[in-house]
Amino acid sequence: MEKVNIHDAKTHLSRLVDRAAKGEAFIIAKAGKPMVKVVPLEPMEAKPLQRTGFMVGQMTVPDDFDEMGRAEIEAMFNGRS
C-alpha cells in the first residue's frame, strides 16, 4: 500500500481522492509515521422512495376541516377576543 507524506497529500488531495474512489487505498504519514488510512467507501444502496399516499385509509379528515376555527380567527382579525 502506498504511503503519502501529509504535505504531498495536501498538495495532491484531489488526485488522491479520485484514486481512492477507484479502489486504491493509501496511507497518509507525518514525518514517516503512518497517521491515517484512506480507503474507498462501500457503494450505498438506494433507498426506495416513499410516495405520497402511503397512509391511505389510516386517517380521516373531517368534512368541515376548512371551517374549523373560523369564528375564532375572524374574531381575532376584527379585534374581538
Image (cartoon, rainbow, N blue to C red):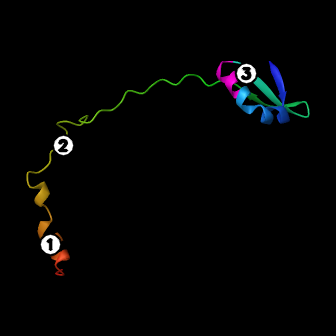
The answer to whether residue 18 is magenta is yes
Using the image, determine if residue 33 lies above or below residue 65. above
Q: Which residue is mark 2?
A: 59
Q: Amino acid at mark 1?
A: Glu
| 3 or 2: mark nearer the eye | 3
In the image, what residue occupies the spot 14% across and 48% down? 61
Tell me the SS state at disc 2: loop
Q: Between marks 1 and 3, how big is the CA–CA gap? A: 67 Å
Could you classify mark 3 by the number of other residues whose Cα lies within 10 Å: few (under 14), some (14-19), or many (20 or more)? some
Element at badge 1?
helix
Q: Position of residue 7 (x, y in %)?
A: 84, 36
Q: Which residues are magenta?
A: 17-23
Relative placement, left or right, of 38 versus 69 is right
Kindly identify the amino acid type of the residue bearing the numbered disc 2: Met
How far apart are labels 2 and 1 at the CA level?
A: 28 Å
**Circle 1 residue:** 74
- Residue that label 3 marks: 25
Give the CA distance from mark 3 to mark 2: 52 Å
Mark 2 or mark 1: name the one nearer the start of the chain: 2
| Callout 1 crowding tier (Cα within 10 Å): few <14, some 14–19, many ≥20 | few
Label 1 or label 3, whichever comes before in sequence order:
3
At a point 83% along the width and 34% down the height, the residue shown is 6
